[in-house]
Structure formats: structure tokens, C-alpha cells
Image (cartoon, helix red, strand yellow):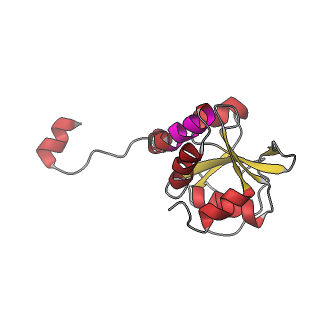
Amino acid sequence: MGFLKKLFGGAEPPADPVEQQSAQNLTIRQAVEQVSAHPSDQTRGALYRRLNDERLLVAVQSLPEVLGPMPQTLTQETHVTMLTSTGPEGGTVLLAFTDEAALNQRAPGRPYLGMPARDVLDLVLRNNYAGLVINPGGPWAGVPRAHVQRIVDGEFA
């Protein structure tokens, strides 16, 4: 491919979307791993800042019928049942994943939707979840609802 690029100019062809998602989310996955290994205000802040820019995967019971062949953008409001769990404090938390490998650790073969992390945070608030757990198969990081609100309010921009 490098030869063709030199010969004709232009960018390399885009990578496989799944590989591209995994590569883009390496920084957020590393931030989750840092929070898991060394929980502190500093590591949490680094993770929270990444949530402003990255994408997350949300496992669902089934994909909406309005979706055709993947990947595709959902352009209308649609009801989906998302994977949740009981959080450390006892409330229901939304589960999200940095990439397919992390998703398959917790929910192998489960269908999922990829979305901007900011939209996932909005789901936590709109649906009254107690928080968000990222990569629950481990290493994982939890984001309590109060922190989700602070991220959305721009405290970690």
C-alpha cells in the first residue's frame, strides 16, 4: 500500500472499522486500566477527560429492526434494552466497553451499539442509572452518577 500511496498520493485506505475502533480507544482503555490499578483523583480525572472525546460500546439485548447491514448510524430514536448490572453501591449501573475484546470478556457474542462516550453519559443521566462501569470483565473502572454529571457539566474538559 505504501508504494501506491507514493505513486498516486492520498491517504491509506481506512482500516477495518472494528480495528479502527480498537485503535482509537487504546487511550481510554489504558486510562481504565490506570484507574483499576492505581485509583486516585489523578487517574480518574485522566479517564474522565478521555470520556469527552472517545467512543464506547454498549451491549444490547438485540439490535433494533430499523438497522440494516452494519456499520450504520441510527438516525431515529429507538428503544433498546441495554446490558446493566448492580453497582458497588447497590444501584443499577450501565455497562460499557472500550472495544470488542473487552465486551467479549463480559458478554461474548452480544450485539452492541457504538456511540460517543458523551452520549453514553447522557444515557446514564436520562435513565437514572446509579453510574457507569467501563470494561466490567476487568480491568474495570466505575463512574458514579455524580461524577457523570460533573463530566457532562464540563468539569473535566
Residue 140 visible to an observer of this rendering: yes
How far across and down, in percent of the image, does residue 95 sit?
Answer: 72, 46
**Main SS category, magenta section:** helix
In the rendered structure, the answer to whether residue 97 lies left or right of residue 124 reads left
**Nearer-the-camera pick, 9 or 126:** 126
Residue at image position (54%, 46%) is: 42
How far across and down, in percent of the image, does residue 24 sit?
Answer: 45, 45
**Nearer-the-camera pick, 10 or 45:** 45
Residue 108 visible to an observer of this rendering: no
In the rendered structure, the answer to whether residue 138 lies left or right of residue 81 reads left
In the rendered structure, the answer to whether residue 95 lies left or right of residue 88 reads left
Residues shaded magenta: 28-36
In the rendered structure, the answer to whether residue 97 lies left or right of residue 2 reads right
**Nearer-the-camera pick, 128 or 36:** 36
How far across and down, in percent of the image, does residue 81 sit?
Answer: 80, 53
Residue at image position (50%, 62%) is: 157
Residue at far right of view: 90
The image quadrant that residue 77 belongs to is bottom right
Residue 95 in the magenta stretch? The answer is no
Q: Is residue 55 above or below residue 15?
A: below
- Quarter holding the N terminus is top left
